[in-house]
Amino acid sequence: MPDAESTLPLLSLIVATVDRVEELRHCLESLRTCTFRSFEVIVADQNEDLRVQEVIESVGSSFPVVWLRMDHRHATDARNAGAARARGQWLGFPDDDCCFLPDTLERIRAHAVGDGIDVLTGMTRDREGNPSVLPWHPAEARITRHVLRRSVAESTLYLRREIFFAVGGFDPAFGPGSLFGAEEGVDLVRRIWREMPSARMKYYPEICFVHDNGSSQVDDRALRKIRIYSRARGACFARHWQSASPRRFVNDIGRHVAGSLIFRGSRRRSRIISLVGYVEGFIAYRQWERQKQRVGGP
């Protein structure tokens, strides 16, 4: 009879979800096609009602699913709570609107088990097969500050559970529903660099997830999203100023200033909004940090 340790899954997939039903359905249904089966899913549900119950019950016979109800909307809290319930040796945090290819988990398993690493990431493509979400690095690479912005997104991030908990998980100050509404994955990787410098991290573009970019229309909603992401990026840079590349900061500012001068129309607006958000986030994080120090916060 197998012992308890041998029956534990290799992978725990923590899916934080809110407001999306059909997207979550497609995400979970795609896991039925995966050839690798040693995984569990923890759905960290931030909805006030039971709208995802039928979706979870419909896949519950295909693989182990834990339905974790949250009492507030906060993606980082949801992911951390899901990780606390996880049993797998490795933790992953797929978005509720991304899907898996049949070989996605098998490729994760192969590198997680065979390469002697502690953190790995893959890339996302849209339904037409084009790179999405980030301007991904074209080749396999160690995750360093030089490729960080082209190799790390929360939805493709997988790491050993002991590494995750050793650095305290995701910081609640970053991510949707937080003071700074994105950058939780980048912040986590930077903290691993700082606190566990011997950790081995690698990016594998062959590990692919399906994730569309969303609407390409630059409307008020898109501009608000750009500002949120840029603000979080500026805050993350402020937090890790000492270990970050000053050249990257200069490049970020210079690129946005140049774009705001060169481009016209919606592209110009987006560059200006991005620049404003970046500077705003940098200043806001510094002020928030000083306030915490004055009141003796953590």
Image: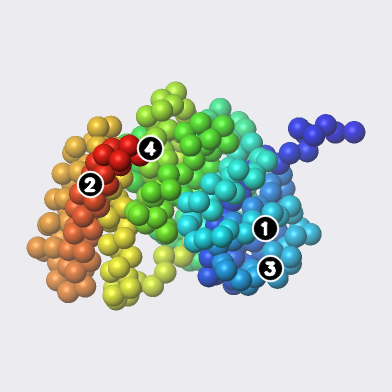
Q: Which mark is residue 287?
A: 2
Q: Which mark is residue 53?
A: 3
Of the residues tagged 3 and 4, which is closer to the observer? 4
Residue 82 seen in the current view: yes
Of the residues tagged 2 and 3, which is closer to the observer? 2
- Residue type at tag 2: Gln
- Residue type at tag 1: Trp
- Residue type at tag 4: Pro
| Crowd class of label 4 (few under 14; some 14 to 19; many from 20; radius 10 Å) | few
Specify whether 136 is left or right of 65: left
Q: CA distance from mark 2 to mark 1?
A: 38 Å
The residue at the point 72 percent across, 48 percent down is 37
Q: CA distance from mark 2 to mark 4?
A: 15 Å
Q: N-terminal of the two: label 2 or label 4?
A: 2
Quadrant position of the N terminus in the picture? top right
Specify whether 21 is left or right of 59: left
Q: Secondary structure at mark 2?
A: helix
Specify whether 157 is left or right of 298: right
Q: Secondary structure at mark 4?
A: loop
Quadrant position of the C terminus in the picture? top left
Mark 3 vs 1: CB contact within 8 A: yes
| Residue closer to the observer: 70 or 222 | 70
User: Residue 228 at x, y = what percent?
Assistant: 31, 60
| Crowd class of label 3 (few under 14; some 14 to 19; many from 20; radius 10 Å) | few
How many numbered marks have been drawn onto this rendered protein structure? 4
